[in-house]
C-alpha cells in the first residue's frame, strides 16, 4: 500500500489485512510500554488546519512505532507544504483538506506515501476505525445492518456503505424530509423508527450548524432511548456517549467512544506500517 486516499477501491481482502494489522497494533497502543520498532528511521509529515483528534492519533501512531513525526498546522498553501515535505525526504505525508482534488493532485506526483486524513468526500481512517469497532462489538461485519443518523460528517457515508456491501451488509441513513441540502447517498429513508428497527449498530455522525436535533434524532437532547430499544439488544452506539430518556440525557452503557478512539490510533499505526513495507 503506497497511498490511502479513500476506501472506494479497496477489496475485502485488503480491508481484512488492515483490520488484522490494526488488531496487532492495538496491543502496543494499550500496553504500558508503548514502543514498537516498525517505523525506526521513518519520518511522517502531517498537515492539518489545526490540532484535532486525527492529528493527535497520527502523532501518537508514529511515536508508538519509533518513527519521527513532523506536524504542520494552518499552512497558507497546503499543497505547497505537502510537496515541500516530499522534496525534503519524508517517508509519508498525512494531509487533511476539504479539497479532494488537492489530496489526489499531491498523491499523483509524490514520491512519498500519502494518507488522506479527511477531505470533502472521504474519511478513510475514520471509517476504518468505525468498521473495526463494529467488528469488535459484533464479532463480524458480515450480514449486519447499520443505522446512521445526523448530517455533519457525510464524507463517511459512501465509503462506509461501500465497505459494508463487501461484507454483505447494509447502511441505512435516516434523513428527515425537511432536509433539502444534504446530498442523499446510499440507502436513505425518512422514517426514523424504520431506520432503527432491527439495527445491529447505530452510528451518530453529528449535526451541522443550525440543524434542529429533534428533526434528526427524534428529540432535542439527542437519540431517544425508545428508538435505541427498537434495535437489537445491547446495540453498540458509535459517535455519541449518550441517549435520552424521560428524565434527560444519560450515559449509554454500550457506547463505543473509548474503543473507537483506541481503534483510530491502531488503524493509523496499521496504515503507516503497511505503507512503510512497500
Image (cartoon, grey):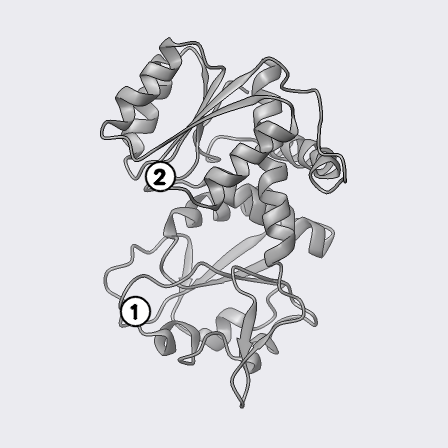
Residue 207 at x, y percent in the picture: 37, 63
Disc assigned to residue 119? 2
Q: In the figure, residue 50 lies in which quadrant?
A: top left
Could you say whether the residue bearing mark 1 is in a helix, strand or loop?
loop
Residue 165 at x, y percent in the picture: 55, 46
Could you say whether the residue bearing mark 2 is in a helix, strand or loop?
loop
Residue 123 at x, y percent in the picture: 44, 41
Q: In this view, does 31 lie to the left or right of 236?
A: right
Viewer-proximal residue among 163 and 49:
49
Circles 1 and 2 in contact, beta carbons < 8 Å: no
Tell me the distance, in whole angstroms, between the alpha carbons under discs 1 and 2.
22 Å
Disc assigned to residue 199? none
Looking at the image, residue 221 lies above or below residue 41: below
Which quadrant would the C terminus be assigned to in this image?
top right
Q: In the figure, residue 6 lies in which quadrant?
A: top left
Q: In the figure, residue 201 lies in which quadrant?
A: bottom right
Give the residue at x 37% y 20%: 107
Which quadrant would the N terminus be assigned to in this image?
top right
Specify whether residue 162 is in view: no
Residue occupied by mark 1 = 211
Circle nearer the N terminus (1, 2): 2
Amino acid at each position: 500500500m503506497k497511498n490511502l486516499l479513500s476506501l472506494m477501491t479497496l477489496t475485502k481482502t485488503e480491508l481484512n489485512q488492515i483490520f488484522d494489522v490494526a488488531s496487532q497494533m492495538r496491543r502496543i497502543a494499550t500496553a504500558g510500554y508503548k514502543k514498537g520498532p516498525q517505523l525506526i528511521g521513518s519520518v511522517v509529515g502531517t498537515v492539518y488546519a489545526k490540532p484535532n483528534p486525527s492529528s493527535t492519533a497520527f502523532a501518537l501512531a508514529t511515536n508508538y512505532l519509533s518513527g519521527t513525526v513532523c506536524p504542520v498546522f494552518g499552512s497558507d498553501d497546503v499543497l505547497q507544504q505537502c510537496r515541500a515535505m516530499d522534496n525534503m525526504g519524508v517517508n509519508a505525508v498525512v494531509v487533511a483538506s476539504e479539497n479532494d482534488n488537492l489530496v489526489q493532485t499531491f498523491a499523483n506526483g509524490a514520491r512519498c506515501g500519502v494518507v488522506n486524513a479527511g477531505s470533502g468526500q472521504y474519511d478513510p481512517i475514520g471509517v476504518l476505525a468505525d468498521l473495526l469497532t463494529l467488528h469488535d462489538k459484533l464479532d463480524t461485519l458480515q450480514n449486519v445492518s447499520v443505522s446512521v443518523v445526523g448530517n455533519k460528517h457525510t464524507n463517511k457515508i459512501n465509503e462506509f456503505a461501500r465497505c459494508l456491501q463487501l461484507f454483505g451488509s447494509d447502511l441505512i441513513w435516516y434523513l428527515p424530509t425537511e432536509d433539502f441540502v444534504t446530498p442523499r447517498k446510499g440507502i436513505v429513508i425518512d422514517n426514523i423508527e424504520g431506520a432503527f428497527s432491527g439495527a445491529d449498530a447505530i452510528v451518530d455522525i453529528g449535526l451541522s450548524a443550525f440543524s434542529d436535533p429533534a428533526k434528526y434524532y427524534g428529540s432535542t437532547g439527542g437519540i431517544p432511548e425508545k428508538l435505541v430499544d427498537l434495535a437489537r439488544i445491547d446495540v453498540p452506539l458509535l459517535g455519541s456517549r449518550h441517549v435520552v430518556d424521560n428524565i434527560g440525557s444519560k450515559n449509554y452503557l454500550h457506547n463505543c467512544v473509548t474503543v473507537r478512539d483506541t481503534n483510530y490510533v491502531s488503524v493509523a499505526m496499521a496504515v503507516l506500517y503497511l505503507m512503510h513495507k512497500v
